[in-house]
Image (spheres, grey):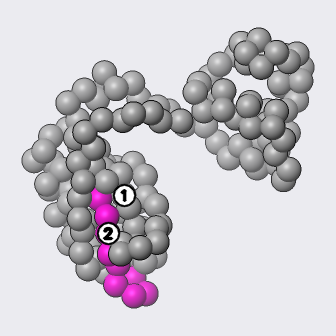
Amino acid sequence: MKITEADQQLLSVLRENARASTAEIARRLRLSRTTVHSRIERLEREGVIAGYTVRVHDEAERGHIRAHIMVTVLPKQMPAVVAALHAMPEVRALHSVSGPFDLVALGVTPSVEAMDELTDRIGAIDGVERTTSAIILSAKFER
C-alpha cells in the first residue's frame, strides 16, 4: 500500500467530512471528479480506507463528561480486558500504549456520576490492576 501525497490530502478531506460529495472534494483538491472517485475506490480496495464512521456534533453531547482512563492490566489478561471494554458503549476508543499504563480508553458519559460508575466498572474487570482518569476539559482540535 503506497500512499501518495495526493492520497494524504484526500484522506485529510475525508477525515473532515466523509460525506462530502466527490464534486466538493474535487474542487477542494483541484482534481477532476473522476480522479477523486478512482482514488477513493483504490484506497478502499487496498484497505487504506477501512470504513467510515459518525462524528457527533459537540452540541448533541453538550454537558457530557469525556475522560481518558488509563488502565494497567495484569499479565496475560489483555484479551479478556479488551473484550470487556469493547462491550461498554461508553468506551468510545481504546489504545494500547507504552509507559506505566497498558491501555488508554476514551470514556464519554452524560454526568460526573456516570463517569464515576464507568471507572468503577472498568476497575472491577477481572485482570484490571489499576485505573487512573483524566477529565478532558476541551478539545483543541480533532481529525
Report whether residue 88 is seen. Answer: no
Determine the residue positioned at 39% across, 88% down: 75
Which amino acid, by three-letter code, is at mark 2? Val
Q: CA distance from mark 1 to mark 2?
A: 8 Å
> Do the residues under discs 1 and 2 have CB atoms within 8 angstroms?
yes
SS for dot 1: strand
x and y percent of residue 117 in the render?
14, 56
x and y percent of residue 130 in the render?
24, 75
Magenta residue check for 74: yes
Residue found at the very far left of the displayed protein: 113
Position of 133 compared to 19: left or right? left
Q: Which residues are magenta?
A: 69-77
Residue found at the very far bottom of the displayed protein: 75
Determine the residue positioned at 18% across, 50% down: 115
Image-quadrant location for residue 57: top left
Q: Is residue 3 above or below residue 29?
A: below
Determine the residue positioned at 74% across, 30% down: 10
x and y percent of residue 76 in the render?
43, 87
SS for dot 2: strand
Which amino acid, by three-letter code, is at mark 1? Ala
**Residue count near mark 2 (Cα–Cα under 10 Å), binned few <14, some 14–19, many ≥20:** many
Residue 87 numbered tag: none
> Which residue in the protein does label 2 denote?
71
Position of 51 compared to 78: left or right? right
Image-quadrant location for residue 128: bottom left
Residue 105 numbered tag: 1
Position of 52 compared to 132: left or right? right
Magenta residue check for 111: no
Q: Earlier in the sequence, mark 1 or mark 2?
A: 2
Report whether residue 116 is seen. Answer: yes
